[in-house]
Image (tube, helix red, strand yellow):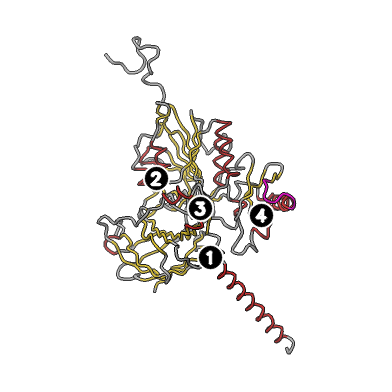
Amino acid sequence: MTRVVPNMRLTMAGLCGALALAAIVFYLTGGRQMTPNCHQIEPDLWPDLRSGMAPEPTPLLGRRSRLVTLHLGFPVRLMADDLLYITASSDRDDVLFVGPAPPDGVINLAFPVLTATGAAETGAAEYTMGFQLIRAEDRIICVWAGEERFNLPAEPDGTAWRVDLLGAAVPTDDGGQRWTRFSPL
Amino acid sequence: MAQDGFSARANADDDCANCPEKTENIIIVGSEFEYTEAGFWLKCMFLACGFAVAQGRTPPPGWSAADRTTLLYVPLGYVRHELLALDWLRDNLGINIVRCTSKANVLSHLRNRKVGGKTHKIKNLVAFCHGLPGYFSLNYSGPGDAMNIYGSDFERLPSDLFAPNGKVFSYACRTAVSTIFNGVLGQRIADHFGVTVRAYHRRTNYGAVMRQRSSSAALATALVAARATREGQKIALPPEHEAFPHPGMGNGVLGIWGASAEGTADYALWRTAGAVSLPAEGTTPAGEPTGYATLTPA
């Protein structure tokens, strides 16, 4: 036992050192060590790609909406000019947010209430969410959009959520994979 | 008095009233960003399927030739080496290749049926792309517009775009599944256009379209050996595969596991003739019905 304890201390010190070094590298690279869902776009595709993204949220045009607060946790370090683009797919695609990524990750979104069976009365709905972080300077877009099912319970529940945007996809219960974890607050 | 069909008074150069209309087969190839770690094996899965069908290899069940074939592709996520296969189709087989960076591009091609002044009805349409219950997702998990195409998008197109006995083959995941808000994508297409639609309730498995799984180890070993002297170049993997340099493919978070350990990172597998076979039915969700469903107009 007396030999094991110093070895463990040495191992722990080594691990701490490695972590500290990784943190320093991450800081010095300005967060450019991106996750696997971050893609650098070819220059000739960039204009087409950006023009295909709505410049502002989809107008509600009289549809009822629910205000929901998301507390986003990013696996990459945000830069000053990063833009955030959030979509919700249901019976159509709705762009919920286009704008600077909030440094504290807190964002209020108006979810359109769906008109199909019962939803209009209760406000309950299921969306497939999409989150994109746009770093125009480097033509990099990080995407958290797989099977990001988000079940919004009937009102008045479900007004605030923590959303972890993950650095790697995780399997879903039914055999798919997703890049986000939603937890009610 | 006007008559249907041929007339003794008709000029020899007149269009005949009852000539069968020209037809077009349409192949949709989506983009692929979903399989980050298995990218070498799966990056070109949609492209290879479309490439094979365009050549008349691995036709979907009931597929038949048309006067014209068009391949619509989403360029995002592919590198030039990979897309050269489409140039080959255009230059050697006269396939009409259409680059689509928005769903409007796709829907516009479906809508516009005139080619050289002649109407071309759609005879067969096949989709090799991702899907979720209720919609095709041509740029699923990709940057930019997801290019989701819903039943309602098809329903906004004229209902007479297809030829009699027109067929749609969906190799996207779960497009025969019923949803609360979107119904069944395949059924909505069948009803609107009066066509037969084939689609899966479960996810679609593309795992064996690029190669027989039993050859995976040999392909990886050959690639690793060739990279020792030809890193960054296109590498032949005889007898029937190639590996295209694709920077960033399968690098993982820090590039130290997965495809990196396998030696396939930064490359994508290509099969010279295109897909070995059509995609197959997957195993999930286990509760969904099995089989390649046939959906006919209600």
Q: Residues within 10 Å of mark 3 (few under 14, many from 20)?
A: many
Q: Can you tell which quarter of the image residue A23 is in?
A: bottom right
Q: Are marks 4 and 3 in contact (CB under 8 Å)?
A: no
Q: Is residue A107 left or right of residue B60?
A: left
The answer to which of marks 2 and 3 sits earlier in the sequence is: 2
The residue at which mark 1 appears reads as: A167
In the image, B93 versus B179, the foreground residue is B93
Magenta residues span B228-234
Disc 3 residue type?
Arg
Q: Residues within 10 Å of mark 2 (few under 14, many from 20)?
A: many
The residue at which mark 3 appears reads as: B203
Q: Is residue B286 visible?
A: no
Q: Residues within 10 Å of mark 4 (few under 14, many from 20)?
A: many
Residue B264 marker: 4
Label 2 lies in what chain?
B
Q: Is residue A121 visible?
A: yes
